[in-house]
Image: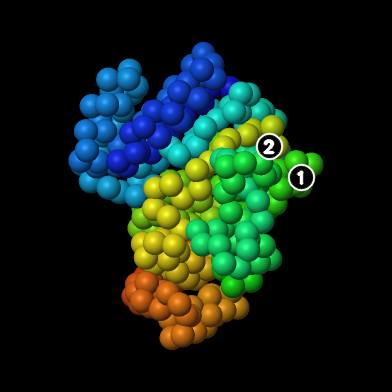
Amino acid sequence: MRARVVIVNWRKTELTLRAAESITRQLGEGSRLVLVDNGSDDGSVSALRAAGHEVVALEQNRGFGGGVNAGARGMDEDALVLLNNDAVAHEGFLAALLKPLEAPEGLRVGAVTGRILLSGRWVPAGPEDRGVLVSREGQRWKRSADGGVKLVNSTGNLVDASGNGYDRDFLVPADGSSADPDVFGLCGGACAIRRAAWEQVGPFREDLFMYYEDTELSWRLREAGWSVRYAEGAVTSHDHAASSGTGSPLFIRCNVRNRIVVAALHGPRSMAARALVRTAARAVKGPDRGPVARGLLEALGRLPRVLQQRWDRGSAGIGTSPHC
């Protein structure tokens, strides 16, 4: 199976070259690697091309979705493979990721999501520790320079009743962990999308700019009758949020806005209502009131157009799924 691998760069040349090196040696005949530079102004394009890579240079930062769309344009390979630029593909990653797509198209496997591990090793964190990662269950972990365990970053994406898209198995110890091959959605950091599925439901929504693009595309895949599979043998190591940081105002604002937009576009009405109510509460009394409020206002400004798009899709016979 021929693949087009796309890696999006923005001012992280060294990370991008590391990711490119990890996947280049796995490319088979007919496959290619395309690096997309998202309007960097730090000499990234010259450095990437000097390393011998095919580079699509965008004049401005179009976000993750816009970068992927540019890299996928004109694709005639069998699958589109995405790899985060702050990730490293382990040996055998590409073959394991593509294998489920080799099933007959009639089985409707539209996309495959990989096993993403956090780079480094981790130990439980105490209440006084800062700069930690916290699981949905409240478990706190800090990076360790001496010992510790490997942790899972993602085995695919899920969506809860409030519209929150999140990584399945986030911060679960990697040793002995396993996950169901069937999963709601793909994680854009390490995934493969069948060309036929991409041509039917793609591309990514560029108005989201960053975060939730993969969740939104996963909704569209499901609504069109495609399934998403998890490939346990397709392993990458990921420097979690190396580009923007999970606590940055940009991260918080985009996540708030896009969660509401995607819930309103695809989820049941109760999901969008929960997303709005909980976000409004955070905007009033939460510790990140400023960026949360800005994200909420941006989402409210987009809701009329989003609801019109949902109506148009429904009128065209494209239903929504209550799966969460």
Residue drawn at 59 percent across, 72 percent down:
162
Horizontal relation, residue 202 to residue 125: left or right: left
Asked if 18 appears above or below 304 in the picture, the reply is above
The answer to whether mark 1 and mark 2 are in CB contact below 8 A is no
Q: Quote the CA–CA distance across marks 1 and 2.
A: 13 Å
Residue drawn at 57 percent across, 67 percent down:
128
Does residue 1 show up? yes
Where disc 1 sits, the SS reads loop
Tell me if mark 1 has few (under 14), some (14-19) or many (20+) residues whose alpha carbon lies within 10 angstroms of its own.
few
Amino acid beneath label 2: Ala
State how the image is colored: rainbow
Residue 139 x %, y %: 67, 62
**Circle 1 is placed at which residue position?**
177
Residue 227 x %, y %: 66, 46
Tell which of 72 and 52 is nearer to you. 52
Mark 1 / mark 2, whichever is N-terminal: 1
Residue drawn at 42 percent across, 66 percent down:
252
Disc sitting over residue 231 in the figure: 2
